[in-house]
Amino acid sequence: MGATITTPPLKQIFPLPNPMTGATGSEGSITFPNGFIMQWGYTAYTSINQTITFPVPFPNAVFMVVLTAYDIAAAVAVSVHAMTLNDFIARAASPVNDYCWIAVGR
C-alpha cells in the first residue's frame, strides 16, 4: 500500500537562528532581528464579538490582522475590529466553529 507521510515539527522545518526568538505551536509569535513581529493563533469561538488576545503584546504597533473562520459548512463573513497592542475583536456575521488568525507588527 501507500507510504505513511510524517510531518516534522514546525521548528525542524523552519529553525530559528539565534537572533530570532519565538514559539512555534498552534499559537505563537516570532520576533525578527529588525523588530518585526509575526503572531498567529487558533481560537475557539465564544461569541459574535469576541476579544482575542495576542500571545505577546506588540511593543509599538500592529500593522495588520488577518482573520478567517475555520471548519464551517457555509460561508460566514468575519472581520477584525478595534486592534490594540494587546488584542483585537473578531466579529462574525453568525456563529462559526473557530477562528484562525495572523497578526504582524513591531
Image: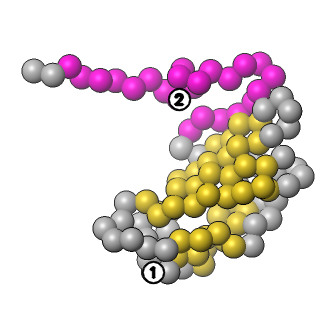
Q: Residue at x 56, y 38 (%)?
A: 25
Q: Position of residue 68 (x, y in %)?
A: 51, 61
Q: Can residue 17 be found in the magenta stretch?
A: yes
Residue 86 is left or right of residue 52, and the answer is right
Q: Position of residue 100 (x, y in %)?
A: 52, 56
- Residue picked out by circle 1: 94
Q: In the displayed orientation, state which residue is furthest to the left.
A: 1
Image position of 81 with respect to 99: above or below: below
Main SS class of the magenta portion in the image: loop
Q: Position of residue 12 (x, y in %)?
A: 54, 20
Mark 2, secondary structure of its residue? helix
Q: Where are the magenta residues, as a range?
A: 3-25
**Other residues around mark 2 within 10 Å, as few (<14) / some (14–19) / many (≥20):** few
Image position of 59 with respect to 81: above or below: above
Amino acid carrying label 2: it is Leu
Q: Which mark is residue 10?
A: 2
Q: Residue at x 24, y 22 (%)?
A: 4
Q: CA distance from mark 2 to mark 1?
A: 33 Å
Residue 1 is left or right of residue 57, and the answer is left
Residue 58 is left or right of residue 51, and the answer is right
Q: State which quadrant residue 33 falls in.
A: top right
Q: Position of residue 61 (x, y in %)?
A: 85, 55
